Image (cartoon, rainbow, N blue to C red):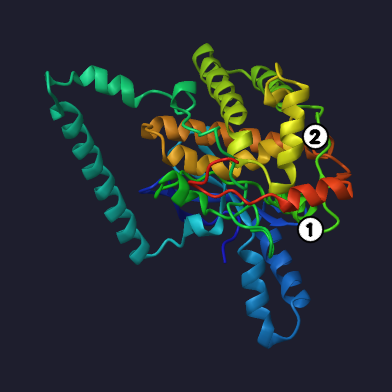
Amino acid sequence: MYSVGELVLARHGLLMIYDAKILKIDMGNGVLVDSRDGTKELMEQRKKQSGKSKHRNIKLEEAMSLWSYFIHYQKWHKKWDEWVTHDRLLKDTGENRALQKKASLEYENAKKAKKLHSNKRIKPTGVVNSRENEAKRKKSPFDRRNVQVDVSRETEYCGEDTTEGESGPHQTSILQQLGCDHPVPITIPFTLKKQLVEDWKQLTHDPYKLVPLPRKPNVQQIIDRFLYHTKSKSIDDTELRNVNEIMSGLCSYFDRCVGSILLYRMERSQYQTLKEAHPEVRLSELYGAEHLLRLFVRLPVLFGSATMTTQTTLTIQSLLADFLRYMQKNASSWFVAEYKKADEAYIATALASEPLRSGNKDA
């Protein structure tokens, strides 16, 4: 168990393990703890609620696996503070310190190997210029040209056949489809995870329902509001340009990904009808918070398939964490209150369609 104020070790990215301090704990169901005494008090309450002693530990462990922790990385600016899940944290022990040292050494070796490779890589015409290589590495993964999504085919958002029951939005079978072994972690707040599960239930369980479209506010409007919110803070011009670039790229990602990896089977006919009715309108101006949140389930894999420097990764992770907190704050007004029930003819057509898998072409 971790408590507020505890010094821990936190995994970040693919290799690094940093010293960190727990500032807050989100225990779910709207319970937020920001003091050590509050942690102890709530833990005692949970123990009393968890039933008989022989089942107590199991129930507590199940509950704690869903907690989120807001941490500060020691000796780093507070702008890198973020919410993480329990599996990103390690106790401050001698064994874990050795693991941290090993991870740091592997990271340094990886950097040296990458630098050596970039300086010595040979083309038929000679040695590649190292500045040219550096420029390539520093391209934002949000660059429209870097978004490799095959829009000629659609895949089930969950990536599985839904005849017997669809996988939840937390599934990662898309890893194999995109050839990514090392996703870049993005922590989704617990309340938004619950929204994802509710969204999944509405679209995959009888009576089948749909998100009413077009949505207001739409994805573009949500991003514009976040940009306005960010501009109201005292940030310099360089940081503001970075924020604009990243959020513009996020919107571009959304437009490219909707039809290929963000839809459940029940939504495909709705998607086609919407495109036919609004052929000149971008999808980010038709869909809303529900589908935008689904994109954040896919982003770790998309980032893992992109070429990014460590600094770029940290910058994007921090900004997207801010954006998710902003979504969480406005969830009551941004997410649809009532899904629209699909009629029987629509449901029959949708269920009769073949689930599309990676490698299958659209019929």
Q: Which residue is mark 1?
A: 205
* Percent position of residue 187, x then y: 57, 46
Kindly indicate the quadrant of the structure image that contains residue 235: top right
Q: Which type of secondary structure does the marked residue at label 2 adopt?
A: helix
Residue 1: quadrant of the picture: bottom right
The residue that disc 2 covers is 334
Label 1 CA crowd tier, 10 Å (few <14, some 14–19, many 20+): few
Residue beneath the point at 41% across and 34% down: 306
**On the rendered structure, is 344 left or right of 53?**
right
Location of the C terminus by quadrant is: top right
Type of amino acid under label 2 = Trp
Q: Amino acid at mark 1?
A: His
**Coordinates of residue 164 in the picture (x, y in percent):** 68, 65
- Residue at figure coordinates x 51%, y 34% from the top left: 150
Viewer-nearest residue: 152 or 289? 152
Instruction: Residue 31: tell me if it is visible.
Output: no
Establish if 67 lies above or below 330. below
- Residue 208, how many percent across, how many down? 82, 52
